Image (tube, rainbow, N blue to C red):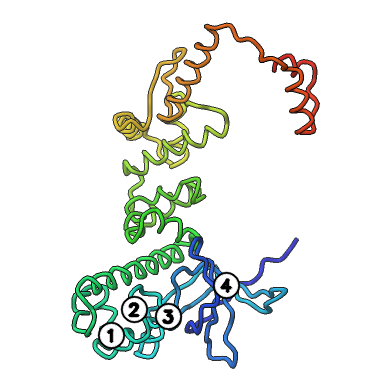
Amino acid sequence: MEETPALHSIDGTVDAVIFQNEENGYTVLRLEVGAPEPVTVVGCIPGVAPGEGLTVTGTWGRHASYGEQFKAESVERRVPAGEKAMLEYLSSGVIKGVGAATARRLVEEFGADLFTVLEEQPESLTKIKGITRKRALEIGASFRLQMGMRRLLDFLSANGLPLQLGMPLYRRYGAQALEVLRDNPYLLVDEELGVGFSAADQLALRLGMEGDDPQRLEAGLLFELSHNLMNGHTFLPRRKLLWATGALIGLEDAGPLEDALTTLVERGEVVRESIAGEDACYLAPMQEAEEYVAFRLAEMAAHELLPPAGLDGLIGRIEAEQGITYAPQQRQAV
């Protein structure tokens, strides 16, 4: 059995960003750690720039072409401190509308208060010659985007969630991503994000959500219906749905779950129908899809369907292209 690499932490200041993928946040950077040579750090650290302080937790490894690297699993980021680091950070181009010359004037004008001004009082940037009110607001907006991403990644790291979630969450919710996630951690239970219900539920409880909070109950019900699609079930009987959800979230009293289910039905997210004596509960898109399939089958059954001309030749070409041979019963079914 292969031994799991030990986790280590290193602390330093970003010297240079060698590569950064804007789509997924994958980054290669050099980190000054007080040693003769900087450390190469790789991992998901979107928006990072020279001058930032980082505490990186991860594992050491060796790349066949690039040598020793430190692979980041979690990252704590610190706003650049001191005029030199602030100047280096802003001169990197990480803030739209700010180049090296503008960065120097901003640092000279506002000093240690600069980042507070950028985030909270961007109109004050008009004190700098050549910065109009419009440009000042744009610079402030760009800086807030950077701070939003930084706080989102800090939140993910602190809660043991993959840093790779940062970019898709940011693309979806923008600068409000952290606020949206705090309001509804169950948004993480999404095919694109790939976070399991258990992890999202633990986060919600850690953030102070009560065990019988309606948001938690609704999320549990929707998860059970979605999860059972993988088992071939387009609906679940109401009794089974309530029991399974109660077992999932550790709630024995079905009353609150009944109320949550009623709310989902009223909002149109769940559809209830009587089928063969069962109170069936569907995700709304599944009920709509099932109705459509039934309608199309009925429509097809009402007309005589004739095979297309040259069917045998068509089947032969498909077999040749796909490298298969249909059994006699399969040919007949086609």
Marks 3 and 4, how far apart at CA: 19 Å
What type is the residue that disc 1 sits on?
Leu
Q: Is residue 319 left or right of 151 when viewed as pictured? A: right
Dot 3 falls on a residue whose secondary structure is loop
Residue 318 place in picture, x, y as percent: 74, 28
Q: Residue at x 19, y 75 (%)?
A: 123
Residue under label 1, please give it: 106
Q: Position of residue 120 (x, y in %)?
A: 22, 73
* Location of mark 2 (residue): 98
Of badges 1 and 2, nearer the viewer stands: 2
Number of marks in picture: 4
Q: Is residue 14 above or below residue 120?
A: below
Which quadrant would residue 141 be assigned to in this image?
bottom left
The residue indicated by pointer 3 is 92
Instruction: Tell me whether the residue at label 1 lies in contact with that at label 2, contact meaning CB atoms closer than 8 angstroms.
Output: yes
Q: CA distance from mark 2 to mark 4?
A: 26 Å
Closer to the chain start, of discs 2 and 3, is 3
* For discs 3 and 4, the disc positioned in front in the rendered view: 3
Q: Nearer the viewer, mark 4 or mark 1?
A: 1
